[in-house]
Image: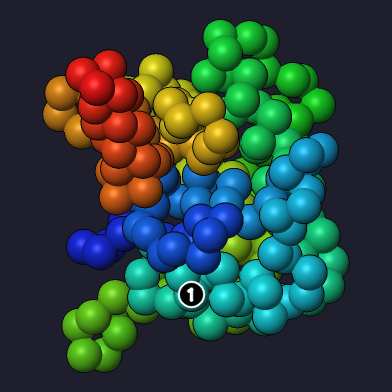
Amino acid sequence: MESSPTTGLTLHSRTGVAYRFDPGALCLELLTTGGPGPYSRYEVLHEPADLAAWADRSRLTPTPVLDVRAADVAALRTLRDALFRVVIAHTRGEPHPPRDLDVINETAARAAMAPAIAPDGKRRWAAGLTGTHLAATVARDAVELLTGPFAHRIRTCAAEDCHLIYVDTSRPGRRRWCSMEHCGNRHKVRALRARHSEEG
């Protein structure tokens, strides 16, 4: 799973407050862009520029230069929705939907983004990358996550009104919130108010 020293996305709450959210995996970062059913109202991938912007915000380092077509956007959305259903089933201990697994596996079987070494010795991506390469990279990350040592630590935020999904990579494995500065803090505030009202 690709990562950088400062991984995580900047999200905004319904009230407009910005906070950091690190889902712990590239494929889970894609789930913040929308999803199937009720999550479609959060859709942000409408055109090639949107997909390029997501890649820029993601944990892929350095930011890849991509040739993205409209068909690539549709394919990434199909992959994302399939991944969303598989991950939700996974967190509930339910069987993975076979058709959605087919989407992930077929996408992962394609050529992924290839890393390279630049003349200055720094990391770069091979030239000629397309949205198809990006989709394959995300799908392979999903396969690694869902079959790897942290598969049992994929969770949904414990806040009732939050549906963000993350993998708990902390050593103790006790992470409950998407973000301590957002849902974790809201929980603390509610608990404090409840205590005060009981004491009053």
Q: Indicate the position of residue 51 as horizontal and vertical percent values.
A: 65, 70
114 in relation to 146, above or below: below
Q: Residue at 57% across / 76% down in the picture?
A: 53
Asked whether residue 171 appears in the rendered view, the answer is yes
Q: Position of residue 108 (x, y in %)?
A: 62, 44
Residue sitting nearer the eye, 32 or 24: 32
- Which image quadrant is residue 173 in? top left
**Colour theme:** rainbow
Residue positioned most to the left? 171
Q: Can residue 105 be seen here?
A: no
Image-based side of 6 in relation to 144, left or right: left
What amino acid is found at the position of numbered circle 1 in the picture?
Asp
Q: Residue at x 76, y 20 (%)?
A: 98
Q: Quadrant of residue 20?
A: bottom left
Question: Which residue appears farthest toward the bottom when viewing the image?
Answer: 120
Q: What residue is drawn where x is 73% and y is 58%?
A: 43
Q: Which residue is mark 1?
A: 56
Counting other residues with Cα less than 10 Å from the Cα at mark 1, is it few (<14), some (14-19), or many (20 or more)? Answer: some
Residue 19 drawn at (x, y percent): 37, 59
Q: Residue furthest front?
A: 200
